[in-house]
Amino acid sequence: MSGATRWPLELSHGPVTLRPWRLSDRRVWDELRRRNADWTGPWDSTRPRDSLDPPLTFAGMVRQFNRRARRGTMLPFAVDYLPPGEQRAVLAGQLTISGITHGSASWAQAGYWIDQRWAGRGIIPIALALAADHCFFTLRLHRIEVAIRPENVRSLRVVEKLGFRHEGFRPRYMHVDGDWRDHEMFALHVEEVGPGLLARLPDQA
């Protein structure tokens, strides 16, 4: 593999950086998740009661993410943001590319969330554009999907801004906020993105 496809990997554009999770992020992660519980709770993936997967600690999550990333099946990014006038970036959210499949399928799925404190600054559109462009042009994937609950207006706005195509409704598609929830499915194929998704965004938008 080329260096650009190996893990760990960092991608940056303007004030936004995607980087691997670190064990040292735990304190900030705990504080961020606690403060955003009401903001992200309705959209957070959960496990069904009969799930065979054991619960994960933060350290277990980071180790699992890195194992999957090294195998090439996931890109689990922390989203850092450098606020205007500041010298140091802050942890602002998460962007995960999961289910990376090559061969005849050549697809993956994206998911994301943002700290309410930094919502509305265009951080997640940049993050998703960065990750998708990497998937299309470096990993040579053909398709990126995003599944969004119909009620999640802010998340729907992200895929709108980047020109994702609506493909339809999937009932009880994913376990979210304690139950199987309906989702709308959006996708893009590499033939649809031209020079890339970053090119669709205003500078620093």
Image: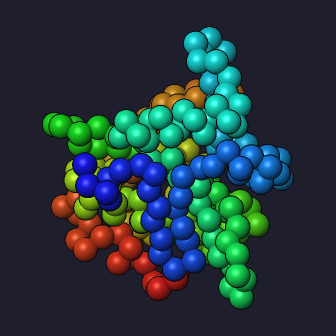
Q: In this rendering, does residue 179 appear at all?
A: no
Extreme-left residue of the structure: 104
In the figure, is residue 128 to the left or right of 6?
A: right
* Horizontal and vertical percent position of residue 197: 35, 69
* Horizontal and vertical percent position of residue 72: 35, 40
Quarter of image, res 169: top left
Quarter of image, res 161: bottom left
Which of the two residues, 85 or 23, is positioned nearer the viewer here? 23
* Horizontal and vertical percent position of residue 202: 45, 84
In the figure, is residue 78 to the left or right of 69?
A: right
Residue plotted at (51% across, 47% down):
76
* Horizontal and vertical percent position of residue 154: 60, 60
Numbered marks: total: 0
Which of the two residues, 69 or 179, is positioned nearer the viewer here? 69
Q: In this view, does 121 lie above or below 183?
A: below
Residue plotted at (41% across, 59% down):
131
